[in-house]
Image: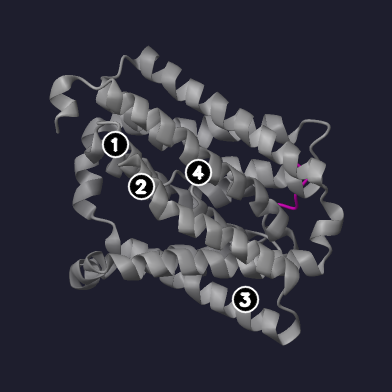
Amino acid sequence: MIARFLAVFEPFILMLLGTVVLASLVPARGEMAMIVGYAADVGIVLLFFLHGAKLSRDAILSGLRNWKLHLAVLAVTFVAFPLFGLGLSALPFVTGPLAAGLLFLTLLPSTVQSSIAFTAIARGNVAAAVCSASFSNLLGILVTPALVALLMRTAGSAGISVEGVEKIVVQLLVPFVAGHLLRPWIGAWVTRRKAMLTIVDRGSILLVVYSAFGAAVVEGLWSRLSLGDLILIGLLCVALLAFVLALTFAVARLMKLPREDAIVLQFCGSKKSLASGVPMAGVLFPPAQVGVILLPLMLFHQLQLVACAVIARRYAESAPSDLAAD
């Protein structure tokens, strides 16, 4: 089961890496860069519109019952993670866009699909995972830009401007709200078309990555980053993931959560969303900076899939016999 799940993600990871290579070798320039940028903007708007239409209001209301668990997930996602990010970005050997990228990674909401899938594999509380992941992504539309404005200036970044706030509202919030308001009429149609959602999800991410890395390459990305920089980012992402996995395990013990809810806290609290992070970075930062800022997120995304696959398998193997038989 785990192998089938990872197989779904592996082609996309390869496409993501292929897009970075393509942008490095053949970056969009001049008028073509403008066309790619506009296409990426359209993809972002469509992405958030469809996610708004897909989000069930009933799921939000029913999830409020397990509010202690959801607050714990949100606290790890939007309080503990940013504190770790501030610590990493303040290290003397982490500077400039790399520091900004590490901090931005920690300000993002949790994933949805992989958090739910790993919770199911581990025999956890799937309904609670759906609610926690949905809450995280819904709040992330507002909380992540606010945290960027509050914290990234401290880390040496320029923060976001009034124009950046307007872009967030127009490209992220308005489409999301519009899609959710239209859910009674188009929600069932959108939910039935999983293939379409997958294409929009991945297509918009690939467009933004190509546009962002292309702009960064034109500005001299690879002349500014060394192999040592890439190794450093990878090691810091491993350390960050290890810290958060240990934290979620410890918090679940302190809260005396039942096994099924502890699994939700670990998987929903330890992840960061590539699907949300890429379009948000495209809106929040200048094109020439986006490529470098996204590098830590792309590495962390792959690491979290591998680590959580191993953890989910161990949870499944140690599940009580009545759960293991489900």
Amino acid marked by disc 2: Phe
Which residue corresponds to the image point at 35% horizontal and 16% vertical from the top-left? 255
Asked whether the viewer can see residue 86, the reply is yes
On the image, the x and y values in percent for residue 1 come to 30, 42
Residue in the foreground of this view, choosing between 233 and 268: 233
Report the residue marked by disc 3. 37
Report the residue marked by disc 2. 5
Quarter where residue 89 is shown? top right
Mark sitting earlier along the chain (1/3): 3
Residue in the foreground of this view, choosing between 105 and 20: 20
On the image, the x and y values in percent for residue 5 come to 36, 47
Q: Is residue 52 above or below residue 75?
A: below
Report the residue marked by disc 4. 272
Q: Is residue 91 above or below residue 62?
A: above
Q: Which residues are magenta?
A: 155-159
Compared across the picture, whether 78 is left or right of 61 comes to: right
Closer to viewer: mark 2 or mark 3: 2
Amino acid marked by disc 4: Lys
Secondary structure at numbered mark 1: helix
Report the residue marked by disc 1. 121
Which residue corresponds to the image point at 27% horizontal and 38% vertical from the top-left? 120
Closer to viewer: mark 1 or mark 3: 1
Question: Marks 4/3: CA distance?
Answer: 24 Å
Question: Marks 2/3: CA distance?
Answer: 32 Å
Closer to viewer: mark 4 or mark 2: 2
Amino acid marked by disc 1: Ile
